[in-house]
Amino acid sequence: MPTIGDVAKAAGVSRSTVSYALSGNRPISRETRERIDLAIAELGFTVNAGARALATSQTMVLGLLLQFHEDEFPPAMLQYILAVSNAARELGYDILMVTDSDGPGAIRRITSSNMVDGVVLLDVTHDDPRLEALRQARQPGALVGLPRDTDGVDVFDLDFSEAARLTIDHLYGLGHRDIVLVSPPRHVFERGGAYAWRYRDAALERAARYGIQVRPYYGESQQPGIERSLNAILDARTEATALVVHNGASIAALPAVLRERGVVVPRDLSVVSLYSQDFGRTFLLPYTAVETSPDGLGRKAVQHLVRRIADPDYGPPVVGFIEPELTDRGSTA
């Protein structure tokens, strides 16, 4: 394998100059930088991660903490993992994904041992037990998801309350007065998934303001429970003219359920949901939907985290919401 000495020889500079160029510890002229970059590319030189860590006190690794729950729908979580991973790679960082059920212990382990330069939390709950350990860490942290207490961390999320209001406004404007809402499973609410009740409660409040009916139900996340629950809800609410689905597993299964029932959208039933464009393409979903923006959220979290790594005094903590956008795909009438 080529060494730093080989790069120095090919670029016509000293080993220390190459080291300075790699670490950024001293300014290097543009011409010298270009010669070093060319030599690195031609030789296929790779910086030794351990040596880089010693030289710069950085690992160029971000910790990504999450949990895969057996009773949840994996494709929904994978969107956010991919978004964070892509954003990190674009900025020159690798990802250490940690799925330990002891979240606080995992944060203490990877931060106290300096395995990572910063931490991203997914699957954030209302009273997330990982936050105290993250606040005590030397490294900065960023969250995708809104907890109750946002003190000391950067937080990014979709404005689920506004997304609900946008959805109800859309249906009310079309004349719908009896609407069914399929929420995430009951266990999501019980585990503290605040996004679930933020959306449900805002939808109910908006409907009450208009004097219309929104009937909420818990959806399911695993088959055969998904189709069974959707059929039971539709059987119980035959008078409803619109169906709002805030449940990734349920919306993925809905086309097959409606086809079996002979329901034509939007002639027989209007349908609105929340999902990303990529999710919709994966499951061939034709429904009007609010964009959930996993890519935008992951990118914002990583970019902000990297700024904090470079400058710990970079401004006060941020709580940022992505404004929801509803794309009309002709499934409401």
Image: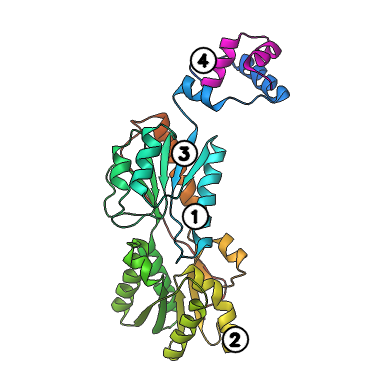
Looking at the rendered structure, the kind of residue marked 1 is Pro
Residue 278: x and y in percent read 58, 60
Please name the residue shown 38% across and 62% down the image: 160
Looking at the rendered structure, the kind of residue marked 2 is Glu
Displayed quadrant of residue 123: bottom left
Looking at the rendered structure, the kind of residue marked 3 is Leu
Tell me if residue 15 is in the magenta stretch. Answer: yes
Q: Secondary structure of the magenta portion, mostly? A: helix
Q: Earlier in the sequence, mark 1 or mark 2?
A: 2
Which mark, residue 62? 3
How many numbered discs, if any? 4
Does any portion of residue 243 appear in the rendered image? Answer: yes
What is the spatial separation of the Cα atoms under label 1 and label 2, in whole angstroms?
31 Å
Q: Earlier in the sequence, mark 2 or mark 3?
A: 3
What is the spatial separation of the Cα atoms under label 4 and label 2, in whole angstroms?
67 Å
Which mark, residue 145? none
- Residue on which the image places disc 4: 27
Q: Which residues are magenta?
A: 1-23
| Camera-side residue of 45 and 287 | 45
Q: Does residue 175 sit above or below 139 in this rendering? A: below
What is the spatial separation of the Cα atoms under label 4 and label 1, in whole angstroms?
37 Å
Q: Are marks 4 and 2 in contact (CB under 8 Å)?
A: no
